[in-house]
Amino acid sequence: MDTLVGIVNYIVFFSITAGIYAILSLGLNIQWGYTGLFNIGIAGFFAIGAYTSALICGPQPGLIDWRVVGGYNMPFIFGLLGGMIVAGIAAAIISLPTLRLKEDYLAITTVGIAEAIRLIAKQESWLTNGVWGINNIPAPVYRPISNGIDGFLNAHPNLPGWMESLIGNGYNWFFLFLVIATLIIFYLAVERIIRSPWGRVLAAIREDETVAQTSGKNVFGFKVQSMVLGAMLMGAGGSLYAHFAMSVGPNDFKPLLGTFIVWVMLIAGGSGNNKGAILGAFTIWGLWAGSDFLVHLLPLSDTRVAALRIIIIGLLLELILLRRPRGLLGEEKGISKLLER
Amino acid sequence: MLQLVIYGIVWGSILSLGGVGLSLTYGIMGFANFAHGDIMALGAYYALVLAAFSKHIGVPSFTFGPLSFGFPMLIAILGSMIMTAITAALIDKVLFKRLRKVQSIILLIAAVGVSFSLRNLLQFVWGPQPKYYFKGIQITRKIPGVAARIKPDEVFIIAISFLFALGVHFFLKYTKVGKAMRATSDNPSLASTVGINTEKIITWTWAIGGSLAAAGGIFAGIENRFITPPLGWNMLLPIFAAVILGGIGSPYGAMVGGLIIGLSEELSTAIIPTAYKPAVAFAIMIIMLLFRPRGLFGRG
Amino acid sequence: MSTILRADNIYSGYGELEILHGVSIEVNEGEIVSIIGPNGSGKSTLMKTIAGHLEPNQGEVILKKESITSLKPDQIIRQGMCYVPQEDNIFPSLTVRENLEMGAFTRSDGFKEYVQDVFRIFPTLKEKRRQKTATLSGGQQQMVAIGLALMMDPSVLLLDEPTAGLAPNLANMILKKAKEINESGVSILMVEQNAKEALSMSDRGYVLAMGKKQYEDTGQALLNNEEVGQLYLGA
């Protein structure tokens, strides 16, 4: 029974992260799946969302804190919205000069931008506390729930161990609920938007950009909007991450787990398909977590294990591209054929 | 100040070596090989193994005069260039070739995948800790007549990079394969119509690009005296900047671009914090992309 | 005089769009044959089909008694027929000489002689042989394109609008050179916008309109034909 509870607790933890990745994946799907924008800078928007949320909701700069700003101690919802808004603004600013570039140029540019954001996070301590990061970010509604759980457990001291463990993990259940709720809201919103007139123009642009241009649509404007929308979702993911991990630092936003894995998720699930984006996130994160178990069975050092897992994910990506580039669910019907020649 | 120029030329030479290979593959195959930096790192690690192996089988390891290395490293450089060329061509045959018919974006994603896999393969085999080419540090020597100092290794790097650049120039200009490569880069359909075997050209491109990448990675290792798995990825952005600055498909452009980027990055440290060095290359690249995307020497 | 090139009953187009509806033409050895007609009549499509850049939906292309319908362009070259497309027909960053070298890429012999032949026909190219073709004028680039094809020592030369975009005196010069090439033994099939000039130097001509053959006669006869003159020659 104990192991069962242990597994359940782990699944809750796993699902929180997978859910956050699903949100990132949805965001990328808007940019890439529906608009064809090759954004390799996901980690950048993710970071902006996380840091903004941390600054808005976090504690005052402490004694060993180099920051000059932040620490307004606002409730979580402000952090979430703030993260989305700032990420969206950043996307708008970045888009204006760069979205006119050809796809591969855009790709390199987004890499550079994500790196620049990470460098700034590392350097500008007055804003981000540099390499030490921002700590003690409050998790939403933590005190009340935590106290409630403690109170309950104290009032019932004779519960079996597994039940204590299950209830003790109660806060994570709440956070999971939060993540899933956000995910569902975003999913419904994106599905709505895609089927709206705005979404139809997007499909037309993807089908044939020149035709859309000549029929008077402001193609560039639509692309910027798509970029901003996707970035806002990524910012939301960042905010959720910050409040779950309760601290953020520049090393949390390295290209691998910040960007690359999201691409693998979207491709595996099926770009151009929102359900695919979510499915891909859970599947790949599952494989990633699974590889953690498997690979730890081997007598290798930690760093080697980490490297091996990434090699596995990389090879998986290549296999998918070679054998089944449509991913698990393929593109949604009726929306154009981006992966076909 | 002049010292920064020296650093810039050294760094620029290394970037040039990476840039030429990237420019060739970009120009002839039309895709941005994101894995190029990691191929450079692969070359650096091949050299590590070869040098140790050479010493092991008894190759005399006295150093050449003021340089930090001797025959084993020389063998390592040549051997690694060959091995990396073969590896690069193999990666193409196994992966990129099959994706060429599909959209170029898929190729890009695949290249990013190769980049991550390769980099972590290096970490898997050799670990994340720095691996040293040589022990200790090398003392700089004063350059006669100039208010700057330089290490003998750095003179080697600059000289050999220049020689390689010359070699590439002669190859492209005067050999049949070289001309065919330039032709394929110009007009692939006409090239295949006149009977140029495009697949063979592509293999040659990978081979040359790969061997130069190896040299670049090794020289970076000689300059820093150690190598780590992210060696190449960290150089990717400045190398891309160099290629775009010089003009995609123009190896000469890549050489000039490499030097300009190298000098800009080093000279910039006089005004802005060193941590932002990569941002300088990035800024130059963005400016080029916005105002003159075909670069200095590129075609329209 | 025997037929060296024949296109039989060609139906051809791009995907769903059929442009040619059953066109048959032939070129006899040593002839210059011109195809004229309004824009969109299918002249270029016919050339591309004959040259192997487009596969016909129906019909056959026969070169020197062998069917070449399904052959690829580089295979057709080896059979002795070269195609000079209207655009994208040179290597811009290569020099004139290097362009000609590329033309002779698969030949292992006789390069020097071929080059001399080309330089004889186009003395300007000899003068500019070390210059990058991207820096040449439109007319000179056309010369390089034709020279490139000549390097492959063809028996049949396909020219797709060789005077397109050229000033009248340059256009005349190109057509004169085509005549010169023909006199040295190369049969020529040519699509031309400058219908009058083309017909006046051609042995025979075809008038193509709306994907079908409308007229077929000797060059001179077509020039004198009143209907043709009014409809197609802007008389």
Image: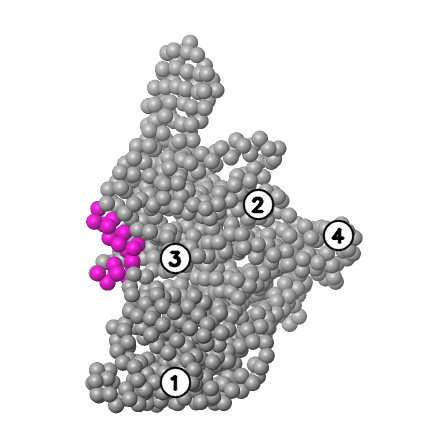
Task: Say which residue label 2 marks.
Answer: B121
Answer yes or no: do the residues labelled 2 and 4 have beta carbons within 8 Å? no
Task: Give the spatial CA distance, label 2 vs label 3.
Answer: 28 Å
Q: Amino acid at mark 1?
A: Ile
Task: Give the spatial CA distance, label 4 vs label 1.
Answer: 72 Å
The residue stretch that appears in magenta: A196-215
Residue C16, image quadrant:
bottom left
Q: Does the magenta-highlighted stretch encompass residue A213?
A: yes
Task: Give the spatial CA distance, label 1 vs label 2.
Answer: 64 Å
Please determine whether, in this image, residue A297 is positioned above or below residue B7. Answer: above
Task: Give the spatial CA distance, label 2 vs label 4.
Answer: 25 Å
Q: How far across and down, in percent of the image, does residue B155 sit?
A: 65, 65
Q: Secondary structure at mark 2?
A: helix
The reply to whether label 2 and label 4 mark residues of one chain is yes
> Is residue C64 visible from the viewing direction of this image?
yes
Q: Amino acid at mark 2?
A: Leu
Task: Say which residue label 1 marks.
Answer: C32
The reply to whether label 2 and label 3 mark residues of one chain is no
Task: Give the spatial CA distance, label 3 vs label 1.
Answer: 47 Å
Q: Which mark is residue A262?
A: none
Q: Secondary structure at mark 1?
A: strand
Label 1 vs label 2, nearer the camera: 1
Protein chain holding label 3: A
| Relative to A284, B14 lies left or right | right
Q: Nearer the viewer, residue B43 or B195?
A: B195
Q: How far across and down, in percent of the image, does residue C77 sit?
A: 48, 73
Task: Say which residue label 3 marks.
Answer: A103
